Image (cartoon, helix red, strand yellow):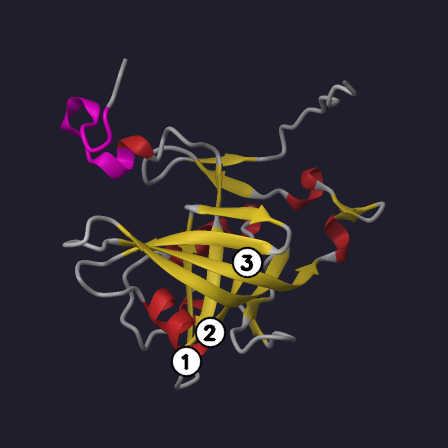
Amino acid sequence: MKVEPGKPPNNQPSHSFFSSVVVPRPIAFVSTVNEKGQYNAAPFSAFSRLGGSVLAFGISRRGHRKKDTLANIEAVGDFVVNMVDENLAQAMNKASRAFPPEVDEIKETGLTPVKSDKVKSPRIAEAPISIECKLMQTIEVGDTANRHHTIVIGQILLYHIKDEIMTDGNVDHRKAKIIARLGGTDIYCRTTDIFEMRRPNK
């Protein structure tokens, strides 16, 4: 089958079909704060580490309005990426609702905000890994008449990793039990089924 961008088979939504192509996708559960000191948290699965101490994630528009996460990052200049494990799955999913800007999704989902060391945005205490980041730049993508997606690029300032998921100085993925997104809007996977494969020397 050959499929052109914007022309998914069976007339299904483009985002639903194409999100099933690049998988699995880690989830950035991003916590931010606005200029009034109000907290926000939302999940994004267009997310990756770019190399070195740089990561990026994508935020789509909600109609013609910027999502609260993007508005907060642009106003304050920082954010925290919280990785999502099996215990955080339900709260992360609940936080994906379109809450009004004044609603604190961390509190709304029963999670615990914790003061960060190097940024104003809070981290989430229950997350196995939290990554404090400073905004480097944002990139608007889409045609000039309809800028519909923003890529946020951040410089990693500090990692918070729970001791119980570490083994011999490394993150133990069997212990961390991170989850990831697959296709559609409601299909996830566990990353505990892993295998090793040595890279060739030559």
Region of the chain picked out in magenta, as a range: 4-16
Which one is earlier in the sequence, the residue at label 3 or at label 1?
A: 1
Q: Is mark 1 on a helix, strand or loop?
A: loop
What count of labels does the image hold? 3
Q: Which of marks 1 and 2 is nearer the N terminus?
A: 1
Above or below: residue 36 compared with residue 142: below
Identify residue for label 1.
38
Q: What element carries label 3?
A: strand
Q: Do the residues bearing badges 3 and 2 touch, measured as CB atoms within 8 Å? A: no
Asked if one can make out residue 193 in the rendered structure from this viewpoint, the answer is yes
Q: In this view, does 67 lie to the left or right of 174?
A: left
Q: Residue 169 carries which label?
A: none
Q: Position of residue 64 (x, y in %)?
A: 17, 62
Residue 77: assigned label: 2
Q: Is mark 2 on a helix, strand or loop?
A: loop
What amino acid type is highlighted by mark number 1? Answer: Gln
Identify the residue at image location x=63%, y=75%.
Answer: 118
